[in-house]
Image (cartoon, rainbow, N blue to C red):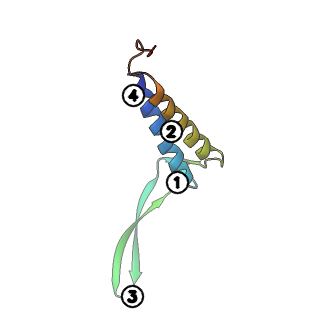
Amino acid sequence: MWRSLFFAVGIMLLIVGGECLLIESATLGNAKMESVQVSNGWFQQPSTTMVASGGKTFKPPEWMPWSLIFSGAVVLLYSFTLPRRWGKSGG
């Protein structure tokens, strides 16, 4: 059970670290959806745009993605080295 728990935590840290590498900022909270009419000569196409109003903006610091990826890799390696059961130590 502990092995699978550490494995899941390590994978989660790797994924969150990778996401922090890809984004510049994220808006957390409520965001309004507005429909805007776009007139392009002959055609009128309704398009939906996200308007970020009333939410917190999260900008991950430069050190955060790499530390999350590194710690996720360490936790994954730890989960691989755990014995299958705590009672078996191999000696």
For label 3, count other residues whose C-alpha is less than 10 Å away and answer few (under 14), some (14-19) or many (20+): few
Task: Determine whether the residue tagged by mark 1 lies in a helix, strand or loop.
Answer: loop
Q: Position of residue 33 (x, y in %)?
A: 41, 58
**Lower position in the chain sequence, tag 2 or tag 1:** 2
Task: Determine whether the residue tagged by mark 3 lies in a helix, strand or loop.
Answer: loop
Q: CA distance from mark 1 to mark 3?
A: 31 Å
Which of pointers 3 and 4 indicates the residue nearer the eye? 4
Q: Position of residue 2 (x, y in %)?
A: 42, 22
Residue at image location 45% in from the left, 60% down from the top: 50
Q: CA distance from mark 2 to mark 1?
A: 29 Å
**Lower position in the chain sequence, tag 1 or tag 4:** 4
Which of pointers 1 and 4 indicates the residue nearer the eye? 4
Q: Amino acid at mark 1?
A: Ser
Task: Determine whether the residue tagged by mark 4 lies in a helix, strand or loop.
Answer: helix
**Residue for badge 4:** 4
Q: CA distance from mark 2 to mark 4?
A: 14 Å
Q: Amino acid at mark 4?
A: Ser
For label 2, count other residues whose C-alpha is less than 10 Å away and answer few (under 14), some (14-19) or many (20+): many
**Residue for badge 1:** 53
Q: CA distance from mark 3 to mark 4?
A: 58 Å
Against 12, residue 85 (above or below) is above
Q: Which mark is residue 13?
A: 2
**Residue for badge 3:** 41
Q: Amino acid at mark 2?
A: Leu
Q: Nearer the viewer, residue 35 or 29?
A: 29
Residue at image location 42% in from the left, 25% down from the top: 3
